[in-house]
Image: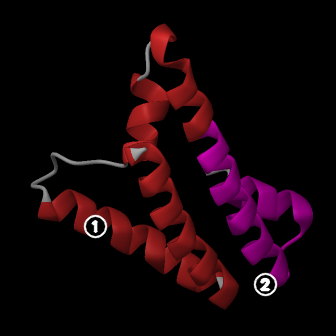
Amino acid sequence: EALEYAGLEITASIDEAAGESAAALLRLFVQFWEHCLVDSDYQAGCPVLAAAVGSGEDEQQLSTSAGEIFSRWRQASREAYLREGFEAADATALADT
């Protein structure tokens, strides 16, 4: 449940920023990490990333859920870049980084 909640919250922010512009999306990304890391004295990180890389075999559902969340984030990012006039291959490459 915590993973789903975090994913939904972050996805909503990404969708809002992506709907505005690719620049707004990049600003959101930088600000998110700046606040997350600085406010926690570099102890906290992304809960979705933690689920993706920290799940053992017995927690496969967490990895699967994290992968689905990341896919949604990549798609929103790709669409924002496409609206800004990026070529499809470039938009995909940027969204995947």
Residue pictured at 68% horizontal, 66% vertical: 77
Residues at discs 1 and 2 in contact (Cβ within 8 Å): no
Relative horizontal placement of residue 35, taking residue 82 as reference (left or right): left
Q: Is the magenta stretch mostly helix, strand or loop?
A: helix
Residue 88 percent location from the top left of the image: 90, 63
Residue 27 percent location from the top left of the image: 47, 79
Extreme-right residue of the structure:
88
Q: Distance between the residues labelled 1 and 2?
A: 25 Å
Extreme-left residue of the structure:
41
Say which residue label 1 marks.
34
Residue 2 percent location from the top left of the image: 38, 46
Residue pictured at 55% horizontal, 39% vertical: 66
User: Which range is magenta?
Assistant: 67-95
Secondary element at image label 2: loop
Vertical side of 17 occupied by 5: above or below? above
Q: Which is nearer the eye, 60 or 53?
A: 60
Residue 69 located within the stretch drawn in magenta: yes
